[in-house]
Amino acid sequence: MTDDHARVFRVIVADDDALVRATVGDVLASEPDIELVAAAADASEAVEAARAWAPDVAIVDVKMPGGGPEAARGIIAASRSTRVVAFSVYDDPASIREMIRSGASGYVVKGAPAEEIVEAVRKAASGLGHLSASIAGDVVRELAGQLEREARAVEQEQAVRDRVERALAPGAIVPAYQAIVDIGRSRVVGVEALARFAIDPVRPPDTWFAEATLAGRQVELEIAAVHAEAQAFEDATLGACYLSLNVSPEAIVARGIFDALVGLPRDRIVLEITEHAPVSDYAALADALAPFRAAGGRLAVDDAGAGFASLRHILWLEPDIIKLDISLTRDIDTDRRRRALAAALITFATEMGIAIVAEGIETRPELDALRSLGVRFGQGYFLRRPCPLAEATAPLFGA
């Protein structure tokens, strides 16, 4: 077998400048082991030349008509054995990275000594890379920085996946429950389950669910939360109270959420859809909910009054319960605008036979104002904070 120096390397030169093509051609033609087989003035000609000649090396101008990166990709697709050497007066790292991403194995700055051009061709033909000395240091530093950033990103993505995996493990979710109160009778009638994570790092539940979404496992985490929260039915302290569960439209449409409810009394379960959850297909959502609701399960639209989405949810989904957002109940005893908007929603709900639950009740005056508007049910820190189930369902005093 002969070595590389005994071989004749076939080369094409692609540059829109005829003088450059001729000059580079003369340089290559002077070498006994290099044969110039074709020249091209634009990207399409370069690709056709590569297809016709299957050269060992193609020297490609970065800024040629049709684009140097496009030419590089086309040449490699047309002749997989061909190595591309980028050639340009531009020595900026961005151009170099773009050509390297497109498959170039070398980069030579125009005006480099003839020996460097020949060396780049020979290295490329032998499967080696080459960068002009004038730019190598900057490029190496830039590429090293890019690789470091990419490595950090990979590490961060893996860390997210690891945290989500821990959140999905049995025992990671320890629910809290907040009482839903019949404020006319001062009696707890239901509890809203709230996912809490008993793992490090300590942070709000929304952060855990946001990371699960990044990892593509949001629905899995919601199902795990519902499994943990639904264990309330195994606790005698739940009594006759109903259980309200926060779920996303995606989890409902995926239907896996209902597997967590198998064997549980549907007439004591409420699924809450937040105002902040976008719904892309109301028909699909209603279809997924139909068996649950037919079995006695109820639907609540959460955060009503926080934005326009809740009104669309109400009109399309015809919920059994509307939960007034804290943005309406806060200072409702002194703010006429909040009181008027809440009154309008309450009137609508009464007309449609929909129950109202006022969230975020934090003071006695707010509670009294809501009572005067005809609100029957409420929850909030004034009535009872989130707590273990036995505390959530304990009798109320003084409400």
Image (cartoon, grey):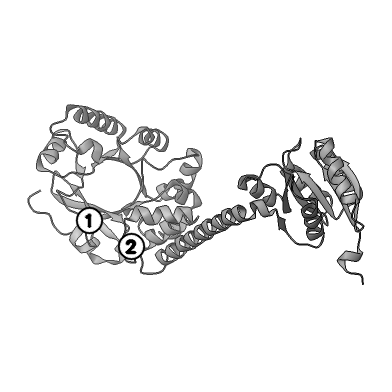
- Image quarter for residue 361? top left
Residue 303: image x %, image y %? 31, 41
Which amino acid, by three-letter code, is at mark 2? Phe
Q: Quadrant of residue 198?
A: bottom left
Which is more N-terminal, label 2 or label 1?
Answer: 2
Residue at 19% of width from left, 47% of height from top?
380
x, y percent for residue 175 = 30, 61
Counting from the top left corner in percent of width and height, residue 181 is at: 19, 49
Q: Which of the pair 168/394 is nearer the observer?
A: 168
Q: Is residue 148 left or right of residue 85?
A: left
> Is residue 50 visible to the viewer in this orientation of the structure?
no
Q: In the visual, does 2 lie left or right of 313?
A: right
Q: Residue at coordinates 40% horizontally, 33% vertically from top-left?
A: 312
Q: Nearer the viewer, mark 1 or mark 2?
A: 2
Question: Which residue is the extreme one toward the bottom?
Answer: 1
Residue positioned 42% across, 63% down in the render: 163
Which residue corresponds to mark 1?
A: 386
In the displayed structure, 1 sits above or below 129; it is: below
Q: Return the x and y of residue 308 as percentages of the image width and height.
A: 36, 32
Q: Which residue is mark 2?
A: 197
